[in-house]
Amino acid sequence: MADNNRVDQKRRLGTSAVKAILLTLPILLLTGLMVTGGQPIPKEAIRLIPLAVTYLFINSIFFLLIYSGRISRYRTILFVTYAACFILTFTTNLIETRGSMILTQENMVKGETPFCPMVIPMVIIPAALTKTIIFPGSMASIGSILVAWLGVTIALGRGWCSWGCFFGGMDEGFSKIARQPVIRNINRKWTYLSFAVLLVIVLTSAATLSPTYCEWLCPFKAVTEFEEITSAKVVVQTVIFFSLFTGLVVVMPILTKRRTQCGLFCPMGAFQSLTNKLNVFDVRVDTNKCTQCNLCVKSCPVFALDEESVRKGRARVTCSKCGKCIEVCPRGAISFHIKGTDVGGNGRTAQLMFIYPAFLLLAIMGSGMISGAIYRVLLLITTGSILK
Amino acid sequence: MDFVKGLMLGLASGAVCAAYCGPVLIPYLLSRGGNILNNLLTILYFMAGRLAGYLLFAVLAWAAGMAAAASIKSEKAVFGVIYIVLAGAMIFYGFKRAGGDCAVKRAGFLCSTTFPAVLGFLTGLNLCPPFLLAFTEAARMGVLWRSMLFFAAFFVGTSVYILPLAILGLGRRIEALRYVGRLAAGVMGVFYLYLGILSLKGA
């Protein structure tokens, strides 16, 4: 029975090996350019091996994704790897350039704080009112992140959260640990919490002229950089960061098998949901094929499907386009969709048109982090130190 | 002259005032889901509470004079307690509200007319930068009615920036906004709780 299901799914979503190879060719070319950064291929093994492994890994993932049609499964492997490698690469780079993961007042004054996309919703109102950016980064890094964010938003909308975000793979990774969820039902009203957090940080940032999410609520401070402990206030902030990380990124994803940080708390995700209208892709349910088994509702990692949205034939605005619902639907009733076209009529075309830019984004974001992490591991093995 | 000075100060710094009151008022208005007229009424209740807070400070400013103004600035404990009371009200409203129009039916004082006034009063007692300016100016006056007139004019000036929030009533048909507003009130309460505890600790 399980084999039959697998064959059905393959017939429905996958493609032949030859076709999959042909579809992988553009990615082989583009990722080749990305991984080397347009530079000559390095001669030293310690530089060459990470690039080669990353290149092979990314392209194998793309081939398998196209061949099997299991978008979510293979995206998850790359996405989680990218997040894990991000922590290693980012923190070791920080330690090399600044001496530690600790962010001092001096670093902030010098503008040595990496600008994170999470800051974007908080800087808009203060920038409009005071013509200043309330974040201690350089204008170059702020400008480049803003341009990159706009591009990703137009291309993928909230797809950023499943194909680009360097934090998203963390709670997704933990959500894959347990076989069955311990907590199955979460009250629908909590799915609005991320919007509430967004509203609060926008208002408080405007009132205090400081990025309040970074100061008080970001769980990822626990694994990236954190402020030097110089006062009781910083102690409280640090306790909050670690508690939120443990609760929302580790424990809750294990218990619910969902991405609780991304689906219930992240204000950047909520912001992406609001700007999702700029993007042409969405996920639609063909109500003629749907039997309302609600398998998609139970498996959506970011709580973007409920019975009502399935009846209406569209995912909620919080859909991160991860492809999980498409993969689990036994009737093939769910597909990526290009706004303004018929539902169900162009599923495969829409799928390919979405997957190319989405996968490229993941490859762009992930390749540097993955090759960087492999390099660090090789450095550790060969020199006994993870730092240069 | 005092009225004009207060009004000008209010108009000049009202945007900052609105930025300080917004985090309390906006989530509440969204959670109520009222139309523009209802929101206007709610804002009036809120502002009545805020005026009461201001006038209380006007009396204090008159009674204390400039020297005491400086000591009140350092009285972090008082403001810490005010923050904590405000936080308690907002957390209770945000996370405990089970349904219905009234915030918490069993706690009558938190019902629709009184609650915004309580929020306004507590917000009026917060030390935002424009408020400190007004307090310092009023403390120089030395006559009670002048001090109160100055604060009343300051209140009118800042209110110009708060009344337009009634426009949030345009989104009243979006049910999700009510959930968002209610949860935001709760999260905002937690934020004020931090501030209150830190204020108390620094006192």
Image: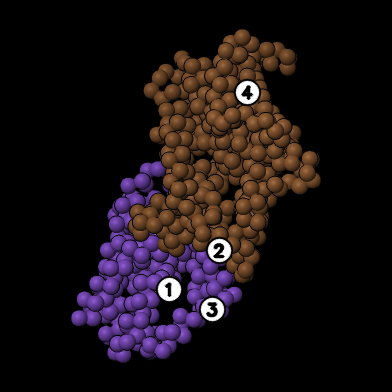
Cα distance between the residues tagged 4 and 1:
58 Å
> Can you say which quadrant of the picture contains the N terminus of chain A?
top right
> SS class of the residue under badge 3?
helix
Q: Which chain is brown?
A: A
Which three-letter amino acid code belongs to the residue tagged 2? Glu
Q: Residues within 10 Å of mark 1 (few under 14, many from 20)?
A: some
Task: Name the side, left or right, on which A216 lies relative to A180.
Answer: left
> SS class of the residue under badge 4?
helix
Q: Are marks 4 and 1 on the same chain?
A: no
- Determine the chain carrying the residue at label 1: B
The foreground one among A257 and B95 is A257
Q: Is residue A330 visible?
A: no
The quarter of the displayed image where residue B176 is located = top left
The residue at 27%/86% (across/down) is B145
The quarter of the displayed image where residue B164 is located = bottom left
Q: Position of residue A292 (x, y in %)?
A: 56, 24
The residue at 50%/31% (across/down) is A315
For disc 1, the marked residue is B127
Kindly identify which numbered label has been placed on residue A28.
none
Which three-letter amino acid code belongs to the residue tagged 4? Asn
> SS class of the residue under badge 2?
helix
* Front label number (4 vs 2): 2
Looking at the picture, does residue A207 appear above or below residue B82? above
Task: Name the side, left or right, on which A209 lies relative to A330.
Answer: left
For disc 2, the marked residue is A106
Q: Is residue A206 visible?
A: yes
The residue at 36%/66% (across/down) is B17
- Determine the chain carrying the residue at label 4: A
For disc 3, the marked residue is B77
